[in-house]
Image: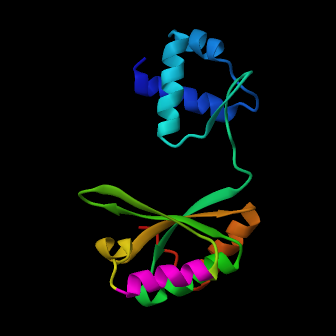
Amino acid sequence: MKAEERRKAIAHLLMSEDKPVSGSTLSEQFGVSRQIIVQDISVLKGQGFEVLSTHSGYIVQKSPYKERVFKLFHTTQQTEQELNLIVDNGGTVVDVFVWHKVYGRVVAKLNIFSRLQVKQFIEGVRSGKSTELMHITGGYHYHTVRAESEQVLDKIEALLSEQGFIAPEI
């Protein structure tokens, strides 16, 4: 098993467990030394996995929040309306990303959870500091939205759909 495959398997195992898994257990299961497991855990942390080291072993910190990715399409003039709709209904806009034909996935962290932050974002874009990522893909973009429950995400999705912001599936 190659290192990257092993790391993916370790991450999957840790995310599926509700209790810590010891380095010795991982070492035995994957047929490598404990030092290799320590290095693998370090790489996983660098990749954004929230792996906690405890006296009982490793565990992935799970967020109590739910997340959903929405594929969206709208004009620049509708961006403020879209973002306000999400935050007004209990969502946090974690990021925005697009799929570029040459560059692949291009992502920007946002973490917008209030009207004040929406206003600041819009002012930044309209001031000419930058343009929205959706412009490089003709208006199509994705948002990862975080909320306290699936019901909140369902409501946000329904409202985005009502406003015509959900991109049609092709």
Quadrant (top left, top right, bottom left, bottom right) of the C terminus: bottom left
Q: Which residues are magenta?
A: 116-127
**Image location of residue 68, percent across then percent down:** 60, 60
Residue 134, picture quadrant: bottom left
Q: Relative to residue 87, is residue 95 depicted above or below?
A: above
Q: Can residue 164 be seen from the camera position used here?
A: no
Give the left or right position of residue 77, taking residue 52 as reference. Answer: left
Q: Relative to residue 166, is residue 11 depicted above or below?
A: above
Give the left or right position of residue 67, taking residue 95 as reference. Answer: right
Residue at 75% across, 61% down: 149
Q: Can residue 104 be seen from the camera position used here?
A: yes
Residue 150, picture quadrant: bottom right
Give the left or right position of residue 57, taking residue 109 as reference. Answer: right
What is the magenta segment's predominant secondary structure? helix
Front residue of 49 and 143: 49
**Image location of residue 30, percent across then percent down:** 53, 14
Residue 158, picture quadrant: bottom right
Front residue of 166 and 86: 86
Q: How is the image coloured?
A: rainbow
Residue at 52% across, 85% down: 80
Residue at 68% across, 57% down: 66
